């Protein structure tokens, strides 16, 4: 049903990397992010934390977490926006508020200062329509 789940988030100069990692720990059990350092326009460091999960147990835990933890409002948002959140390759894109995750509250956001999550949905043949069908029928209990 799902090939893999990956995330990416940025740690800006005004943020504490340890706190951002704690935010990740709320969403993912035992995250071990890969760390990349880039510079912004002002030559300040921006740390990029990313990781990909492809083990079934990790994927199941995350999907259960989403199904159990998302608010009814956020579930409705995903349902309403599913067509826009899935691409032609079967990737479902979600963004979660970093500050809320640090406070152990799961909240969708539309801002860039977020934990960006990509869920690669397994469907055959690969298409947006088939990925949406799989998401509705087999992955999320709220669609």
Image (cartoon, rainbow, N blue to C red):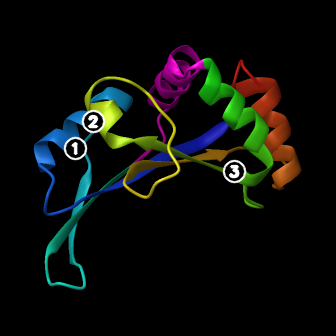
Q: 127 or 95: which is nearer to us?
A: 95
Q: What x and y, as percent, mark residue 96?
A: 45, 41
Q: Quick check: 136 left or right of 38?
A: right
Which residue is at 78% across, 61% downward? 88
Residue at x 26% of width, y 32% of height: 102
Residue highlighted by disc 1: 20
Residue 19 is left or right of residue 83, and the answer is left
In this view of the protein, which residue sits in the foreground, 74 or 132? Answer: 74
Q: Are the two marked residues, 1 and 3, in contact with CB atoms closer than 8 angstroms? A: no
What's the distance in space between the residues labelled 1 and 3, CA to CA?
24 Å
Residue located beneath label 3 in the image:
85
**Label 3 packing within 10 angstroms: few (<14), some (14-19), many (20+):** some
Labelled pair 1, 2 in contact (Cβ < 8 Å): yes
Q: What residue lies at 73% left-to-right and 60% top-to-bottom?
A: 89
Residue 122 vs residue 102, the one in the foreground: 102
What residue is pinned by disc 2? 23
């Amino acid at each position: 049903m799902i090939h893999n789940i990956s995330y990416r988030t940025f740690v800006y100069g005004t943020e504490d990397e340890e706190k951002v990692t704690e935010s990740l720990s709320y969403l993912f059990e035992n995250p071990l992010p890969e760390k990349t350092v880039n510079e912004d326009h002002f030559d300040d460091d921006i740390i990029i934390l990313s990781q990909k999960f492809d083990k079934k147990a990790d994927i199941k835990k995350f999907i259960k977490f989403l199904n159990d933890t998302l608010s009814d409002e956020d579930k409705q948002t995903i349902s309403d926006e599913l067509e826009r959140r899935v691409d032609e390759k079967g990737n479902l894109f979600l963004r979660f508020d970093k500050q809320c995750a640090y406070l152990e509250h799961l909240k969708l956001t539309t801002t860039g200062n977020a934990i960006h999550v990509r869920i690669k949905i397994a469907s055959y043949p690969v298409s947006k329509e088939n990925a949406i069908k799989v998401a509705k029928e087999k992955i999320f209990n709220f669609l």
